[in-house]
Image (tube, rainbow, N blue to C red):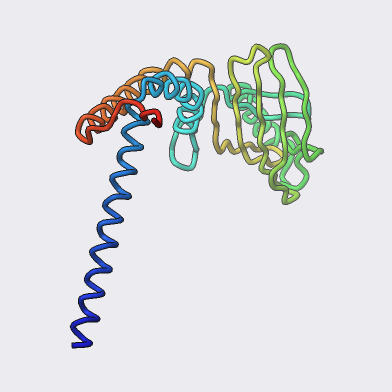
Protein backbone atom coordinates (compact mmCIF):
# COMPACT_ATOMS: atom_id res chain seq x y z
CA UNK A 1 0.00 0.00 0.00
CA UNK A 2 2.77 2.40 0.92
CA UNK A 3 4.55 1.62 -2.36
CA UNK A 4 1.37 2.25 -4.38
CA UNK A 5 0.78 5.53 -2.54
CA UNK A 6 4.36 6.64 -3.21
CA UNK A 7 3.99 5.74 -6.90
CA UNK A 8 0.71 7.68 -7.15
CA UNK A 9 2.32 10.72 -5.53
CA UNK A 10 5.23 10.65 -7.98
CA UNK A 11 2.85 10.35 -10.93
CA UNK A 12 0.85 13.29 -9.62
CA UNK A 13 4.01 15.35 -9.27
CA UNK A 14 5.03 14.51 -12.85
CA UNK A 15 1.57 15.43 -14.15
CA UNK A 16 1.65 18.78 -12.33
CA UNK A 17 5.19 19.46 -13.60
CA UNK A 18 4.24 18.58 -17.18
CA UNK A 19 1.15 20.78 -16.97
CA UNK A 20 3.14 23.72 -15.56
CA UNK A 21 5.79 23.34 -18.27
CA UNK A 22 3.06 23.29 -20.91
CA UNK A 23 1.58 26.47 -19.50
CA UNK A 24 5.04 28.09 -19.42
CA UNK A 25 5.71 27.19 -23.04
CA UNK A 26 2.33 28.56 -24.07
CA UNK A 27 3.09 31.80 -22.29
CA UNK A 28 6.46 32.00 -24.02
CA UNK A 29 4.87 31.41 -27.44
CA UNK A 30 2.21 34.01 -26.65
CA UNK A 31 4.87 36.60 -25.73
CA UNK A 32 6.87 35.80 -28.90
CA UNK A 33 3.71 36.12 -30.99
CA UNK A 34 2.85 39.47 -29.39
CA UNK A 35 6.35 40.81 -30.07
CA UNK A 36 6.69 39.55 -33.66
CA UNK A 37 3.12 40.46 -34.58
CA UNK A 38 3.27 43.93 -33.08
CA UNK A 39 2.82 46.92 -35.37
CA UNK A 40 6.11 48.30 -33.99
CA UNK A 41 8.10 45.19 -34.86
CA UNK A 42 8.74 46.02 -38.54
CA UNK A 43 10.11 49.58 -38.08
CA UNK A 44 12.14 48.70 -34.98
CA UNK A 45 13.64 45.52 -36.45
CA UNK A 46 14.44 47.28 -39.74
CA UNK A 47 16.19 50.11 -37.88
CA UNK A 48 18.24 47.65 -35.82
CA UNK A 49 19.03 45.61 -38.92
CA UNK A 50 20.28 48.63 -40.87
CA UNK A 51 22.62 49.47 -37.98
CA UNK A 52 23.86 45.91 -37.37
CA UNK A 53 23.70 44.66 -40.98
CA UNK A 54 26.84 46.39 -42.30
CA UNK A 55 28.86 45.02 -39.36
CA UNK A 56 27.64 41.51 -40.10
CA UNK A 57 28.48 41.86 -43.80
CA UNK A 58 31.88 43.29 -42.88
CA UNK A 59 32.61 40.22 -40.73
CA UNK A 60 31.41 37.85 -43.47
CA UNK A 61 33.51 39.67 -46.10
CA UNK A 62 36.70 39.53 -43.98
CA UNK A 63 39.43 37.67 -45.86
CA UNK A 64 42.40 35.56 -44.75
CA UNK A 65 45.32 34.62 -46.97
CA UNK A 66 45.84 31.32 -45.08
CA UNK A 67 42.40 30.18 -46.27
CA UNK A 68 43.35 30.89 -49.87
CA UNK A 69 41.14 33.98 -50.02
CA UNK A 70 42.14 36.98 -52.11
CA UNK A 71 42.71 40.00 -49.88
CA UNK A 72 40.95 43.29 -50.57
CA UNK A 73 42.84 45.47 -53.08
CA UNK A 74 42.97 48.25 -50.45
CA UNK A 75 45.46 46.26 -48.34
CA UNK A 76 48.32 48.50 -47.14
CA UNK A 77 51.45 48.29 -45.00
CA UNK A 78 53.45 50.79 -42.96
CA UNK A 79 56.85 51.73 -44.32
CA UNK A 80 59.13 53.98 -42.26
CA UNK A 81 56.57 54.60 -39.47
CA UNK A 82 54.65 57.34 -41.31
CA UNK A 83 54.36 56.09 -44.90
CA UNK A 84 52.03 53.48 -46.37
CA UNK A 85 52.17 51.36 -49.49
CA UNK A 86 49.55 49.39 -51.38
CA UNK A 87 50.00 45.97 -52.93
CA UNK A 88 51.33 47.13 -56.31
CA UNK A 89 53.87 49.53 -54.80
CA UNK A 90 54.84 46.89 -52.26
CA UNK A 91 55.43 44.20 -54.88
CA UNK A 92 57.56 46.60 -56.89
CA UNK A 93 59.62 47.60 -53.84
CA UNK A 94 60.18 43.99 -52.72
CA UNK A 95 61.24 43.06 -56.25
CA UNK A 96 63.81 45.89 -56.25
CA UNK A 97 65.01 44.86 -52.79
CA UNK A 98 65.57 41.28 -53.93
CA UNK A 99 67.49 42.40 -57.02
CA UNK A 100 69.64 44.70 -54.88
CA UNK A 101 70.30 41.99 -52.27
CA UNK A 102 71.33 39.49 -54.93
CA UNK A 103 74.10 41.86 -55.97
CA UNK A 104 75.10 43.45 -52.65
CA UNK A 105 74.39 41.10 -49.71
CA UNK A 106 75.08 37.45 -49.09
CA UNK A 107 74.53 37.55 -45.33
CA UNK A 108 70.79 37.67 -44.45
CA UNK A 109 71.49 39.45 -41.14
CA UNK A 110 73.26 42.28 -42.98
CA UNK A 111 70.16 43.26 -44.93
CA UNK A 112 68.90 46.78 -44.26
CA UNK A 113 65.55 47.19 -42.53
CA UNK A 114 62.69 48.30 -44.74
CA UNK A 115 59.51 47.07 -43.02
CA UNK A 116 60.12 46.56 -39.29
CA UNK A 117 58.70 49.53 -37.38
CA UNK A 118 60.62 51.12 -34.53
CA UNK A 119 57.61 51.93 -32.32
CA UNK A 120 54.97 49.65 -30.75
CA UNK A 121 52.29 51.77 -32.40
CA UNK A 122 51.49 55.15 -33.86
CA UNK A 123 49.12 57.26 -35.90
CA UNK A 124 49.44 59.75 -38.74
CA UNK A 125 47.41 61.18 -41.59
CA UNK A 126 47.84 61.53 -45.31
CA UNK A 127 45.83 63.28 -48.01
CA UNK A 128 42.46 61.58 -47.57
CA UNK A 129 42.91 59.11 -44.70
CA UNK A 130 43.86 58.69 -41.05
CA UNK A 131 46.17 55.76 -40.24
CA UNK A 132 46.73 53.88 -37.00
CA UNK A 133 49.07 50.93 -36.58
CA UNK A 134 50.15 48.69 -33.73
CA UNK A 135 52.62 45.84 -33.31
CA UNK A 136 50.72 42.79 -32.07
CA UNK A 137 53.75 40.48 -31.83
CA UNK A 138 57.47 41.28 -31.99
CA UNK A 139 60.14 38.58 -32.07
CA UNK A 140 62.97 40.91 -33.04
CA UNK A 141 63.39 39.56 -36.56
CA UNK A 142 59.68 39.64 -37.38
CA UNK A 143 56.61 41.64 -36.36
CA UNK A 144 52.89 41.00 -36.61
CA UNK A 145 51.42 44.41 -37.48
CA UNK A 146 47.86 45.68 -37.78
CA UNK A 147 47.17 48.83 -39.81
CA UNK A 148 43.80 50.61 -39.79
CA UNK A 149 42.98 53.18 -42.45
CA UNK A 150 39.95 55.46 -41.94
CA UNK A 151 38.77 57.69 -44.76
CA UNK A 152 38.35 61.29 -43.67
CA UNK A 153 34.88 61.39 -45.22
CA UNK A 154 33.86 58.34 -43.14
CA UNK A 155 33.07 56.29 -46.25
CA UNK A 156 35.39 53.35 -45.53
CA UNK A 157 37.60 51.75 -42.90
CA UNK A 158 40.18 49.11 -43.88
CA UNK A 159 41.95 46.84 -41.42
CA UNK A 160 45.10 45.11 -42.71
CA UNK A 161 47.22 42.54 -40.88
CA UNK A 162 50.58 41.30 -42.07
CA UNK A 163 53.85 39.82 -40.89
CA UNK A 164 56.87 42.02 -41.50
CA UNK A 165 60.55 41.16 -41.72
CA UNK A 166 63.44 43.43 -42.61
CA UNK A 167 62.96 43.03 -46.37
CA UNK A 168 59.81 40.93 -46.66
CA UNK A 169 56.06 41.38 -46.13
CA UNK A 170 53.63 38.49 -45.76
CA UNK A 171 50.00 39.69 -46.09
CA UNK A 172 47.68 37.86 -43.68
CA UNK A 173 44.17 39.34 -43.64
CA UNK A 174 41.95 42.28 -44.50
CA UNK A 175 38.57 43.51 -43.31
CA UNK A 176 36.57 46.49 -44.56
CA UNK A 177 33.74 48.48 -43.04
CA UNK A 178 32.33 50.18 -46.12
CA UNK A 179 29.38 52.60 -46.06
CA UNK A 180 27.93 50.84 -49.10
CA UNK A 181 27.40 47.68 -47.03
CA UNK A 182 24.21 49.36 -45.77
CA UNK A 183 22.67 48.97 -49.25
CA UNK A 184 23.77 45.32 -49.36
CA UNK A 185 22.08 44.70 -46.00
CA UNK A 186 18.74 46.38 -46.75
CA UNK A 187 17.15 43.54 -48.81
CA UNK A 188 18.07 40.95 -46.16
CA UNK A 189 16.87 43.19 -43.33
CA UNK A 190 13.50 43.91 -44.95
CA UNK A 191 13.00 40.30 -46.05
CA UNK A 192 13.95 38.85 -42.66
CA UNK A 193 11.84 41.35 -40.70
CA UNK A 194 8.83 40.74 -42.95
CA UNK A 195 9.12 36.94 -42.56
CA UNK A 196 9.31 37.23 -38.76
CA UNK A 197 6.33 39.61 -38.75
CA UNK A 198 4.27 37.15 -40.79
CA UNK A 199 5.26 34.33 -38.43
CA UNK A 200 4.17 36.49 -35.50
CA UNK A 201 0.77 37.21 -37.07
CA UNK A 202 0.25 33.51 -37.82
CA UNK A 203 1.12 32.63 -34.20
CA UNK A 204 -1.33 35.25 -32.98
CA UNK A 205 -4.04 33.72 -35.13
CA UNK A 206 -3.26 30.15 -34.09
CA UNK A 207 -3.02 30.97 -30.39
CA UNK A 208 -5.99 33.33 -30.67
CA UNK A 209 -3.98 35.93 -28.81
CA UNK A 210 -4.96 39.60 -28.97
CA UNK A 211 -2.88 41.82 -31.22
CA UNK A 212 -2.01 43.92 -28.16
CA UNK A 213 -2.25 43.21 -24.42
CA UNK A 214 -5.61 44.12 -22.92
CA UNK A 215 -5.78 46.98 -20.44
CA UNK A 216 -6.57 45.88 -16.89
CA UNK A 217 -10.19 46.56 -15.98
In the rendered view, tell whether residue 89 sits above or below residue 99.
Answer: above
Rendered residue at 62%/23% (across/down): 86
In the rendered view, tell whether residue 117 sits above or below residue 215.
Answer: below
Rendered residue at 74%/41% (across/down): 105
Rendered residue at 53%/22% (across/down): 73
Viewer-closest of 191 and 74: 191
Residue 74 percent coordinates (x, y) = 57, 22
Work out which quarter of the rendered image holds the N terminus and state it: bottom left
In the rendered view, tell whether residue 46 sits above or below residue 146.
Answer: above
Viewer-closest of 46 and 97: 46
Viewer-closest of 150 and 42: 42
How many numbered markers are drawn? 0
When asked about the image quadrant of residue 110, the answer is top right
Q: Report whether 193 appears left or right of 145.
A: left
Residue 13 percent coordinates (x, y) = 28, 68
Residue 19 percent coordinates (x, y) = 25, 57
Residue extending farthest right: 118
Work out which quarter of the rendered image holds the C terminus and state it: top left
Viewer-closest of 118 and 28: 28
When asked about the image quadrant of residue 45, the answer is top left
Residue extending farthest front: 217
Rendered residue at 18%/83% (across/down): 4
Residue 188 percent coordinates (x, y) = 36, 23
Amino acid sequence: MALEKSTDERCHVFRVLAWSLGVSYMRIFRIIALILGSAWFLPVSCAIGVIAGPKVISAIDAREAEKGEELHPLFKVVVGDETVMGLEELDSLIHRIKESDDHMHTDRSAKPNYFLVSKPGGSFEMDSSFFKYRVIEDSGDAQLIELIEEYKDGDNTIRSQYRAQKALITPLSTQMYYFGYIFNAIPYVIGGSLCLFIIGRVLLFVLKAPAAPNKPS
